[in-house]
Amino acid sequence: MGEVIGIPNGLNWEKSERLHSNFDKMSKNKDCSRTPENNIDNSIFNKLLNELDCCDKLRGYIDHFVAHSLKPEKIEKLDNETLRVTFEHLWEAQQVICKVTKFVGLYLLGIVDYGLLPFPHGSLLQYIEEPLILKEEKTKLREEENKFRDEIHSWETEIDDFCG
C-alpha cells in the first residue's frame, strides 16, 4: 500500500492503444490491419485547412496592413469592408485556431491536453500587495470567468468531427 509504481510514457499501453485507434480512424483503416504504408487520409488535413478558412479575412488584413504596408494610393482603392476587422472576426479566428491546434496536438502529435485557457506571462506575484479587484466584484469576476471557461470548453473537438 505504501508503494507507487510509475509507468514511463514509452511503456504506457493505454496511450499507445488510443494513439493506434486514432490513427486507424484518421487513415480510414476500418479493419485495423495496420501496415507501414498506411497514411492519414488527406481529407483530414483538408477539413483542418477548411476550418481555418474563416481566418482569411483577418489574414488578408494582416498581409495588407501589418506584415506588408500598402502604399497610400492602394489603400484608397480598397473598400471599407476590406479595411474593417471586428472583435467578432478576431474571436472567431481564435476559436478556430484553438480547435485546430488542439486537434493536431491531441490526435496527430499525441501530446497531453494542455487546455485552451491563456496564462499570464511574467510574475504572478508582481502585484501581490495590490488588490486587482474590489471585494464586491469577486462574485461577478468568478461568474465571467466561468462563462469564459464554458465557452472555451465548447471549442473542443473530437476526432470523429474530422474522421466522419
Image (cartoon, rainbow, N blue to C red):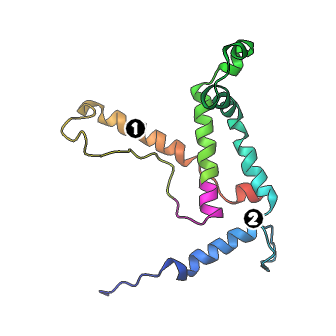
- Dot 2 falls on a residue whose secondary structure is helix
Residue at horizontal 59%, vertical 51%?
A: 156
Amino acid, disc 2: Met
Q: Which residues are magenta?
A: 102-113
Residue at horizontal 51%, vertical 49%?
A: 116
Residue 38 lies, in percent from the top left, at 80, 73
Residue 26 lies, in percent from the top left, at 75, 64
Report, in whole angstroms, how far the alpha carbon at label 1 lies from the one at label 2. 38 Å
Q: Which residue is mark 1?
A: 143
Q: Is residue 20 above or below residue 51?
A: below
Report which quarter residue 12 is drawn in: bottom right
Q: From the viewer's side, name the closer residue of 71 and 122.
A: 71
Amino acid, disc 1: Glu
Residue 8 lies, in percent from the top left, at 48, 80
* Residue 110 is inside the magenta segment: yes
* Residue 159 is inside the magenta segment: no
Q: Which residue is mark 2?
A: 26
Report which quarter residue 17 is drawn in: bottom right
Report which quarter residue 125 is drawn in: top left
- Which tag, 1 or 2, sits closer to the chain's start? 2
Q: Is residue 127 above or below residue 99?
A: above
